[in-house]
Every structure is written in C-alpha cells, then in structure tokens.
Image: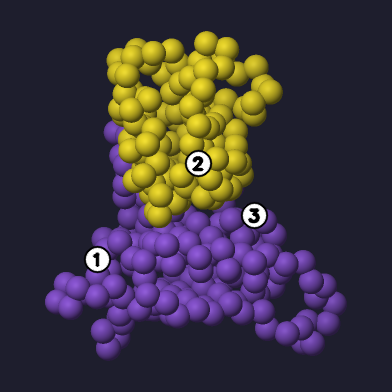
Chain colours: A yellow, B purple
Amino acid sequence: MNVTVQNESGRVVVRMSERRLDAVIAGEFKDTVRPHVAIKGPDLVLDLSEVEFLDSSGLGAVIALKKALPEGRRMLLRGLTPNVERVFRLTRMDQVFDIIGAEHGTGS
Amino acid sequence: MASRGNATAQPIIVFTRSFVAVTRTVREVLIDMNTRLSPHATPDLMGRAELALAELLNNVALHGRDLESGDQPMVHLSVVAQPDGLACSVSDDGGLLPRVCLSSTGPDPQTHPEGGFGWFLIGHLAQSLVYFRERGRNFVAFTIPLQPPRPD
C-alpha cells in the first residue's frame, strides 16, 4: 500500500497515495499509519488528496486513527476530494475533524 | 451525458454482474461499473451510486456469510441508467438482513464511532428502497436520483 510519511513545515504529513480507501485496505491502512499517529509529536496532517473513493470502512479507519492520538496531539485532514468529502458530510463526521484545504492553502 | 432528444430511440444502458461477495471483487465490480456507466451519468451521480452500492455489497461480503455452509454469498447486481437516475438492484443468497439495518438512524459523531454508517449512508443516498427475502435470497432495489433528494 502506498503511504508516505514526511515532515513538512513542522508538521508530520501522512499522505495516502491510493485511489481507493475502501473495505479492501481499510484495516491495512489503519495498521500502517497507527504507529505514526499513536506517539507524541507535532500536529499531524492526513493528506487524502489522491483518494477518489472512500467508503464507511475507510471512514472507520480514519476515525480509529484520530482515536489513537495521544493527549494534546491533533490530526488534520487535508485535500478531501468530492466523493470523500461527501462521506464526512453525510455522516456528520466533518463536525469532529479539523479539515483544511488543498496543499497550497494556508491551513491552520 | 447522451442527448435525450429522441428518448424512445435510446438504447437501454445497463450494467450487470454476478459474483462471489468478497471485498476485492466488490471493488473490481464497482470500478467496472464506473467505466461502463460514467459516460451516461454525472460524476456526482456516479459518486453517490458507487458509495451506496459499496456499502450494500461490502455488507454482504463482510456479514452475509451463510452460517451453516460458511460460503460467501453469490450476488447478482444490475444497474440501469435512466433519465432520472441510476436504478440499482442487488440480490444475494446470504443470511437474513437484520431489519434494524433498514431503519438505521446513524451513529452519533461525537462518540467517534468506527462503524455502523453503511445503512445510514444507503438511506441517505437512495430513493424508493425496497427489501424482501424470498426462497433464501435477499432482494434490495433502489434508485440513486439524478438530483440529490435533499441538500447535502
């Protein structure tokens, strides 16, 4: 699975470079990323700009990662494509995640 | 989208598949469906249909196993492109669909639920949803409307 982790302006950026975050790979994605999330460190950005399709299994994996954060560490979501944004909106999970714009946006 | 100037002369655009319900096959079928139907639907409509069908089919793949035989269910899928949306029908020979699925209200986001969204999403996306079980098969049919049913 194609996931990269790198430092970017003082934040850890986890980039999911698969086009589909679905029931096939949700578990593997969660297990791959969790070690990077569950430790203390700077705020983390989960970049989903290459993900064109997300289902509820993929959503569950992203929620599980948020729950794995240690106290005081934040996880921001970046670059949600229309199909991905729809899932967060319909499930109202957009209310509990910090969602920032594309890579070139200023973010917060 | 194709012109509908002469609707009666339009061929019926349909995608059908029969397959064993495992998540990897569900993914392949949805990709094939996109390839087949994208020329006849808006990206927004395709996105909503793909999501609803992913939830339904993965539900069958993950929870529909026959408890006696242990076999994965066999699914028949049919999607027809119509002027008002995509008409989807799915049947499978898996276990009985719990009735609670069809009235799902969705989990509370504040509790950070990791599951339980599937039927909630289907209910949001689908119109005219019907379910029945006959001769050991589940039948689910619904339409994904060209226009979303409510501002979402």
Q: Callout 3: few (<14), some (14-19), or many (20+) C-alpha neighbours within 10 Å?
A: some
Query: Of residues B143 and A15, which is closer to you in this image?
Result: A15
Q: Which mark is residue B44?
A: 3
Examine the image and state in which quarter residue B71 appears: bottom left
Q: Residue at x 59, y 41 (%)?
A: A50
Are circles 1 and 2 on residues that touch, CB within 8 Å? no
Q: Residue at x 36, y 70 (%)?
A: B21
Q: Is residue B147 above or below residue A7?
A: below
Residue B105's x, y, as percent? 34, 50
Q: Which mark is residue A2?
A: 2
Mark closest to the chain's N terminus, 3 or 1: 3
* Left or right, residue B10 beside residue B25: right
Task: Answer yes or no: is residue B58 visible.
Answer: yes
Q: Callout 2: few (<14), some (14-19), or many (20+) C-alpha neighbours within 10 Å?
A: few
Examine the image and state in which quarter residue B131 appears: bottom left
Q: Residue at x 69, y 73 (%)?
A: B83
Residue beneath disc 1: B98
